[in-house]
Amino acid sequence: MHKFGELQNKKDQNQLHFSIKISMEQSDSYNVKQIISSLSHELRTPLTILSSNLQLLKDHQFKLEDELRKETFQLCEEALHSVTQFLDDIHFLNIANKGELRKKSKKFSIDHMINHILNDHHTKFYHSPRIKTEIHLEDDSFLSDELLLSKAITNLLDNAYKFSGKEVWLKLTNANKCLTIEIEDQGAGIPAREMDLIFMPFYRCDNVKMLSGSGLGLSITQQAINCLNGEIKIESTLTKGTKVKLKILSDEF
């Protein structure tokens, strides 16, 4: 087991090193300290939570009150999911950067996809009344890669929710075999001078560095939308908010 752990750790480190190498190749002015800070935070914080709560269970030999024991296990599960999700995101970008990302098209229900996204308890916006929807469908079925599209929408909603304390709108229209998705917030906005950098892995705008985040969301979204042969456009005004618009054509075309 010890050797397996060492091999797994080495594999994870190789993934991180590869992603950093790709990021550095994309821009000579990239801030290395920012990458290291993101990596440190995204891994150290949940691992610290895991360690402290496992120690609590160990010290009390699991003889805790039911509510406290339940809460402790829940914190451990959330921390583990956070680390796993971060490594999955790194893996996704590695595949995309190597040109190995492929879409797997099948017909799916748009309404079912949106409900699944909004009811995912692992997201920050789970059951939040701040998420407002406006959906108009000529046809509920759509032919594309549901997983890639869900990943893109989830990352955009997560950003909008995190960077805005107000309502976040998810507007979706399916007409003439074209799916149009708009996600709009009233948050911090993106500085104009940084608009050309926001799709780079690990990049975080100066005005939101105090908030938690890996800086991978927009990069993953762009890769997913590119794989779907779609379009992504972003409009943003500092301190007033951001609107992201996605357009995806059905593979029936």
Image (spheres, rainbow, N blue to C red):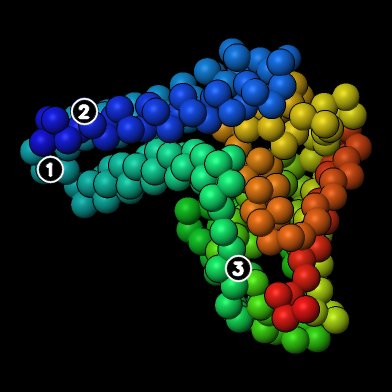
Are circles 1 and 2 on residues that touch, CB within 8 Å?
A: no
Residue that extends furthest to the left in the rendered view of this protein? 61
Q: Residues within 10 Å of mark 2 (few under 14, many from 20)?
A: few
- Give residue 62's mark: 1
Q: CA distance from mark 1 to mark 2?
A: 29 Å
- In the rendered structure, which disc, 1 or 3, sits on the residue that comes first in sequence? 1
Q: Secondary structure at mark 3?
A: loop
Q: Amino acid at mark 3?
A: Asp
Q: Position of residue 168 (x, y in %)?
A: 76, 54
Horizontal side of 29 relative to 114 (left or right) equals right
Q: Secondary structure at mark 1?
A: loop
- In the rendered structure, which disc, 1 or 2, sits on the residue that comes first in sequence? 2
- Give residue 6's mark: 2
247 or 38: nearer the eye?
A: 247
Task: Look at the picture and state if 206 lies above or below 250.
Answer: above
Q: Position of residue 215 (x, y in %)?
A: 62, 33
238 or 227: nearer the eye?
A: 227
Name which quarter of the figure residue 220 lies in.
top right
Q: Residue at x 88, y 40 (%)?
A: 236
